[in-house]
């Protein structure tokens, strides 16, 4: 039987469950990349995502929002859209500073590989179309995520060689919303 998922805007009642998604999936990503020794970096990334989610829920921030996916009323994944991030600005000499960013795409490890991330991306594209956003960017320094994004989003806008140290490239993509939305015109 196929699992039933629901996607909706994040709400204050989702904070604790979303925090678990960040903690679990970011820790797993660091481990998969062989970076588990970088405990401070991992904790910084987790805390940064928790803080971003809280900022997105404050009434004063309309530029940043999160969608969450639930299975049996439990949060199993997140995605966000907001202003261009610092790494993208650095890697592109601020060429994409005006473009919003798809970010915080995290899925609990037990739910990865089941289409949850793709469903979150489609839901975000639907929302961006409603907002009349035509382009978005995204970035990644994780090799495993880069492999997935190369398949899904194609050739990067830029590859910042050795951005994270030797062989630690950072990739940035610039995409059109219409190319990734579920309905076609």
Image (cartoon, helix red, strand yellow):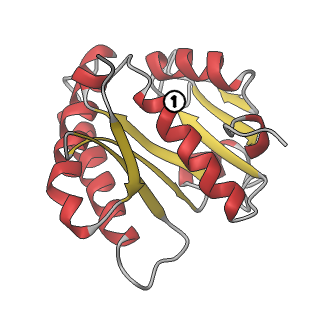
Q: Name which residue lies at 26% across and 56% down.
A: 50
- Quadrant for the N terminus, please: top left
- Farthest bottom residue? 60
Q: How many marks?
A: 1
Q: Name which residue lies at 35% across and 79% down.
A: 58
Q: To which quarter of the image does residue 71 belong? A: top left
- Quadrant for the C terminus, please: top right
Residue 111 at x, y percent in the picture: 28, 24
The residue under label 1 is 118
Q: In the drawing, does residue 33 fall left or right of residue 153?
A: left
Q: To which quarter of the image does residue 53 belong? A: bottom left
Residue 126 at x, y percent in the picture: 63, 50
Q: Name which residue lies at 32% across and 52% down.
A: 49
- Crowd rating for badge 1 (residues with CA inside 10 Å; few <14, some 14–19, many 20+): some
Label 1, secondary structure: give it: helix
Q: Nearer the viewer, residue 34 or 173?
A: 173
Q: In the drawing, does residue 7 fall left or right of residue 152?
A: left
Q: Name which residue lies at 54% across and 39% down.
A: 121
Q: In the drawing, does residue 33 fall left or right of residue 162?
A: left
Q: Nearer the viewer, residue 30 or 91?
A: 30
Q: Is residue 162 above or below residue 134?
A: above
């Amino acid at each position: 039987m196929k699992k039933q998922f629901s996607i909706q805007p994040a709400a204050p009642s989702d904070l604790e469950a979303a925090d678990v998604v960040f903690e679990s999936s970011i820790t797993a990503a660091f481990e998969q990349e062989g970076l588990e020794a970088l405990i401070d970096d991992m904790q910084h990334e987790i805390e940064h995502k928790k803080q971003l989610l809280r900022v997105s829920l404050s009434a004063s921030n309309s530029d940043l929002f999160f969608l969450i996916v639930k299975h049996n009323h439990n949060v199993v994944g997140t995605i966000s859209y907001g202003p261009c991030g610092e790494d993208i600005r650095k890697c592109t000499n601020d060429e994409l500073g005006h473009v919003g960013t798809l970010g915080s795409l995290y899925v609990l490890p037990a739910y990865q590989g089941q289409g949850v991330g793709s469903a979150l991306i489609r839901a975000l594209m639907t929302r961006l179309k409603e907002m009349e956003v035509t382009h978005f960017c995204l970035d990644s320094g994780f090799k495993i995520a880069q492999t997935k994004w190369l398949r899904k989003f194609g050739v990067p806008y830029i590859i910042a060689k050795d951005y994270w140290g030797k062989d630690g490239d950072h990739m940035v993509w610039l995409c059109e919303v219409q190319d990734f939305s579920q309905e076609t015109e």
